Amino acid sequence: MVNVNCSAMIFLTAAVVGSMESRKTGLIINIASDFGRLPVSLYGATKAFVIHFSKCIRYEYAPSNIHVQCVCPMFVCTKMSGMKRSSFLIPMPEKFVQHALCSATRLKVSFRPHSMNGCVFPMVIRPAFQSMTIFTTHPSLYGPYNEKI
């Protein structure tokens, strides 16, 4: 997972950024996940790396007019997510890609339902999810604290 989500992205970025820099223009789109904002698993950790790496290269190559966008989808209908039917909050991959490409030089993805969720998620769902994850994922580490709650 680290090789696919982190190492491959670093090598591919290194392979293309030189020619973009010499042309003084370019666009790099990295795919992370909203799970990169939560301490849930190795998958989340690799996606957190993608988010941070994207921010770093965005600032490093901004003087060369190289735009970097990090797309952080929530759920999309794919085999990996297990979602089979699309809905207002869960788009088909083609629709999500279309919206991501339309917002390619912006800092935020323009798929509105995910943007709306992105406003609610940090305030309400993330704190509850984090406390639940910490106490259920590592009971041996947090057992005494869990008993006091």
Image: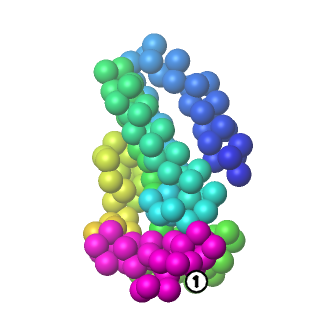
Measured along the vertical axis of the image, is residue 74 above or below residue 7?
Answer: below
| Residue 72 image position (x, y, % from top left) | 46, 57
Measured along the vertical axis of the image, is residue 87 above or below residue 55?
Answer: below
Region rendered in magenta = 120-149
Instruction: Answer whether residue 103 is magenta in the image.
Output: no
Q: Nearer the viewer, residue 90 or 1?
A: 1
Which corner quadrant of the image does residue 84 belong to?
A: bottom right
**Residue behind mark 1:** 85
Q: Residue at x 59, y 50 (%)?
A: 46
Which corner quadrant of the image does residue 59 belong to?
A: top left
Q: Residue furthest top?
A: 22
Q: Nearer the viewer, residue 46 or 108?
A: 46
Measured along the vertical axis of the image, is residue 50 above or below residue 39?
Answer: above
Q: Residue at x 60, y 76 (%)?
A: 139
| Residue 76 image position (x, y, % from top left) | 54, 70
Q: Residue at x 60, y 33 (%)?
A: 10
Q: Main secondary structure of the magenta part?
A: helix
Which corner quadrant of the image does residue 57 belong to?
A: top left
Query: Secondary structure beneath disc 1?
Result: loop
